[in-house]
Image (tube, helix red, strand yellow):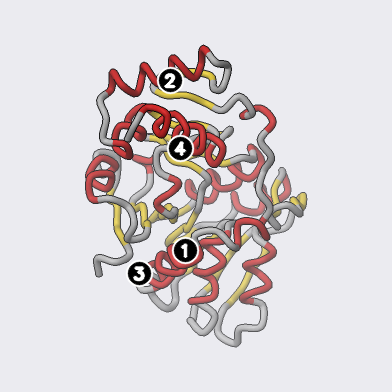
Amino acid sequence: MIKKERLNWILDQLSQQSIITVNAIMDALKVSDMTVRRDLAELEKEHRLIRIHGGAQSINLSNRQEKTNVEKQSQQVAEKKQIASYTAKRIQDGETIFIGPGTTLEFLAQELVDRKLRIITNSLPIFDILKDSNSVDLLLIGGEYRPITGAFVGSLASNNIESLVFSKAFISANAVYKDTVATYSESEGTIQELALNKSIEKYLLIDYKKFDSYDFFVFYKTSDFDYVITDGKLSNDKKNEYEEFTRVLKANEG
C-alpha cells in the first residue's frame, strides 16, 4: 500500500471510530511502528487528526454524537446474532440473570423467549421482547429513561439493583481497549457496573469491531469479566492478546 492510500485509510478509520491505536494500524496495514508514527505526524501537521499516547484521535471527537438504538440495530447484525446464539447455550434453565441495554443483548433476549428463567433488565427494548413470554419471570428496573438507547438509569435504578443478586450478568459496551471497558453514557455505565458487581459470573458481549477502541466513560476492567464473548471475525492474534486479561470465547469455535 502506497503512502497516500495509508493516509486515506487512517482518516477513514477515524471517521468511523474516532480513535485508533498505532498497533491497530500496524496490524491492519502490515507496516512498521516507525512508518505509522511518520504517517500520523504528517496528518497532524496538516491538522487532519490529533496525536495521542499510543495512537491518534479524530479532530471531531469532541463533537461525536451517541448512536441511537435504531442506528445500532443495522450494524454487525450477523455477528451480533452469532454472539447471541452462542451465549444462550451458556445459560441454564432456572437461573436468575441480568441483561443490560444494547442491540447485541436484544438478540440474546430473542434467544431466551421460550426459556424458563428469571430475567432482570433495565432495557425497555429487551423488556418488550420478553414481555409476552409464558416461561420467563421478567423484572424491569425502572428509573430515569434514556430514549436514545431505551435504558433506565439514575439513582432509582441503582437502588433497585443494589437489593438483587444474579447468577450471571450479560453486558455490552461501545469499546474495549486492553484492560478498560467503556461506553458513551456515564449514567448507563454506572448501572452496568452495579449489575456486574452483584453477579456471580460476569459476561461481556461485543462484536469484533469494539476491540482496540475507545469511548468516553470507562465503567469496568476487562480483567474483571469472567468471559468476553465475541464473533468469529476477531483474529486469533487479537484473541490471544486479550486473553492476557480474561477468557475470550469466539462464537464460531463451538
Give the residue displayed 36% in from the left and 60% down from the top. Answer: 231
Quadrant where the N terminus sits is: top left
Looking at the rendered structure, the kind of residue marked 4 is Ser
Q: CA distance from mark 2 to mark 4?
A: 17 Å
Q: CA distance from mark 4 to mark 3?
A: 27 Å
For residue 92, above or below residue 35: below
- The local secondary structure at tag 4 comes to loop
* For residue 230, side relative to residue 110 (left or right): left
- The local secondary structure at tag 1 comes to helix
Residue position marked by numbered label 1 in the rendering: 80
Looking at the rendered structure, the kind of residue marked 1 is Lys
Q: Are marks 4 and 3 in contact (CB under 8 Å)?
A: no
Looking at the rendered structure, the kind of residue marked 2 is Leu
Residue position marked by numbered label 3 in the rendering: 90
Q: CA distance from mark 1 to mark 4?
A: 18 Å
* Residue found farthest to the top: 45
- Occupied quadrant, residue 129: bottom right
Q: Find residue 210 and report its horizontal and vertical position in percent.
A: 45, 46
Q: Are marks 2 and 1 in contact (CB under 8 Å)?
A: no
Q: CA distance from mark 2 to mark 1?
A: 32 Å
Given residues 66 and 47, the one toward you in this image is: 47
* Residue found farthest to the bottom: 134
Residue position marked by numbered label 4 in the rendering: 213
Given residues 107 and 15, the one toward you in this image is: 15
Q: Which mark is residue 40?
A: 2
Q: CA distance from mark 1 to mark 3?
A: 16 Å
Tell us which disc is closer to us: 2 or 4: 2
> Label 3: how many residues lie within 10 Å, few (<14), some (14-19) or many (20+)?
few
Q: Find residue 174 and report its horizontal and vertical position in percent.
A: 53, 45
First in residue order: circle 1 vs circle 4? 1
